[in-house]
Image: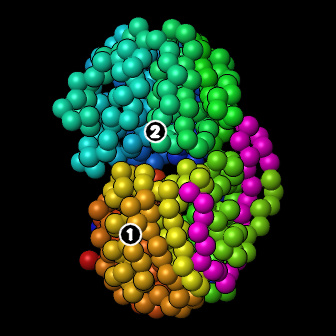
């Protein structure tokens, strides 16, 4: 499926984006590991999360959908031997977290995914989990793989990169490991796993190493909980970005998670001169939430610090699209993780921006965008996305403010994180249509 975005005038309205994918994955996994009935409100029902729901069933949990976003998860008190392959589809988060959780139990579980996920490195979790005592059958440290778990020992693991997926896999395995498990990373990555483990009754705290606090978990049996899932800040980034670059726009994006470790994009946008306001702040679940009001803004190029990268790693594609409309150079560094996402997002974004008439170049760990200000982006291109949902949505947003329409291919993959994206944006006045 191909979608075309056309500049059609101002965007206005109030919307709630899809619920947070990271919290949704974790609610299902921890609910399946726990004892008793966990309930959710606002669970994201996108393809990636539904793969994790099916995995939870295969590991012995009983799941029932009781309404839109409302699920009941009857945990088995741990993972049981699955009777078939765990198919994670396109979800790197689902795959790595589930492998970590499964490693703690005396079972053998086979994991697989689609062609994109099969190319993504699994050695980053295989390494620490093997140190803990898990065994793996994998031809190239990628999917498909089989994990043989149980009888783990806790470790202190110093991760070479800041990654919530690595951290979560190790902490989940540590729930069933002898002794304590500590995860050290260069910069703090998103902390939803630590927060939610506490809600489910895990023995988790922090320990100071090298002048910084790092998560530590001890063997724990999880209980049940009620999890409210706010709107995903990564999904909220698209209507916010569109409002910033489409003239005479004002959009209120409601109920957005504003966890400080997920707020890097919005910090950067404020530095660029974005007119953003946070209203209706609240904290009902141990995770801060607010409405974000975005207005058309005159933006300038910036260089966000590399240490901010973990808090905005999923938002770099849309930041690159926004930067095309800013005055001056935006230099994004510390983002080498973008090369091992659903695609090589650095190469795809640079190629797509150049096709749309934007001055952009690759860096080993990021990219440079030399923006020409409002109305400077020609557009008029058909952009290859290699099935990457965030790349596709970023170029559709760019097309809403470009002089000529922009077309993206393989747009059906947008449903992995943002079901109904085109309809959602049309509700604000955007012109996004399917084309042959």
Residue 171 shown left or right of residue 356 in the figure = right
Q: Between residues 412 and 240, which one lies in front from this camera angle?
A: 240
Residue 414 shown left or right of residue 267 in the figure = left
Q: CA distance from mark 1 to mark 2?
A: 23 Å
Q: Quadrant of the N terminus?
A: bottom left
Q: State the residue position of label 2.
A: 160
Q: Quadrant of residue 184?
A: top right
Provide the residue span drawn in magenta: 282-306
- The chief SS type of the magenta part is loop
Q: Earlier in the sequence, mark 1 or mark 2?
A: 2
Considering only vertical position in the picture, is 375 above or below 193?
below
Q: Residue at x 29, y 30 (%)?
A: 111
**Would you say residue 275 sits in the magenta stretch?**
no
Q: State the residue position of label 1.
A: 362
Considering only vertical position in the picture, is 295 above or below 376?
above
Q: Between residues 405 and 298, which one lies in front from this camera angle?
A: 298
How many marks on residues? 2
């Amino acid at each position: 499926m191909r979608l075309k975005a056309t500049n059609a005038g101002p965007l206005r309205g109030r919307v709630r984006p899809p619920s947070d994918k990271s919290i949704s994955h974790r609610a299902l996994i921890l609910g399946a590991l726990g004892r008793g009935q966990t309930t959710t409100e606002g669970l994201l029902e996108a393809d990636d999360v539904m793969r994790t729901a099916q995995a939870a069933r295969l590991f012995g949990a009983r799941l029932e959908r009781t309404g839109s976003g409302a699920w009941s998860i009857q945990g088995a008190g741990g993972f049981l031997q699955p009777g078939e392959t765990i198919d994670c589809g396109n979800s790197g988060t689902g795959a790595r977290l589930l492998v970590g959780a499964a490693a703690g139990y005396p079972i053998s579980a086979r994991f697989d995914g689609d062609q994109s996920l099969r190319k993504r490195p699994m050695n980053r979790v295989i390494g620490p989990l093997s140190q803990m005592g898990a065994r793996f059958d994998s031809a190239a440290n990628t999917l498909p793989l089989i994990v043989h778990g149980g009888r783990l020992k806790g470790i202190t693991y110093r991760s070479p990169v800041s990654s919530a997926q690595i951290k979560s896999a190790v902490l989940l395995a540590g729930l069933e490991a002898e002794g304590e498990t500590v995860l050290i990373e260069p910069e703090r990555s998103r902390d939803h796993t630590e927060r939610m483990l506490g809600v489910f009754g895990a023995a988790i705290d922090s320990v100071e190493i090298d002048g910084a606090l790092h998560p530590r978990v001890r063997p724990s049996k999880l209980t049940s909980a009620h999890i409210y899932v706010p709107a995903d800040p990564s999904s909220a980034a698209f209507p916010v970005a569109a409002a910033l670059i489409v003239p005479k726009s004002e959009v209120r994006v409601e109920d957005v998670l504003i966890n400080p470790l997920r707020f890097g994009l919005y910090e950067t946008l404020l530095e660029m001169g974005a007119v953003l306001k946070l209203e209706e702040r609240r904290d009902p679940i141990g995770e801060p939430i607010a409405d974000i009001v975005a207005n058309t803004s005159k933006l300038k190029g910036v260089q966000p610090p590399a240490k901010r990268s973990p808090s905005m790693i999923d938002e770099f594609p849309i930041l690159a699209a926004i930067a095309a409309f800013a005055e001056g150079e935006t230099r994004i560094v510390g983002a080498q993780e973008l090369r091992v996402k659903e695609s090589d997002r650095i190469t795809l974004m640079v190629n797509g921006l150049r096709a749309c008439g934007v001055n952009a170049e690759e860096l080993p760990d990021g990219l440079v965008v030399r923006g020409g200000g409002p109305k400077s982006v020609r557009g008029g291109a058909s952009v290859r996305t290699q099935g990457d949902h965030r790349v596709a949505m970023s170029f559709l947003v760019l097309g809403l403010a470009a002089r000529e329409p922009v077309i993206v291919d393989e747009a059906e993959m947008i449903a992995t994180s943002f079901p109904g994206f085109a309809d959602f944006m049309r509700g604000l006045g955007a012109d996004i249509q399917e084309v042959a």
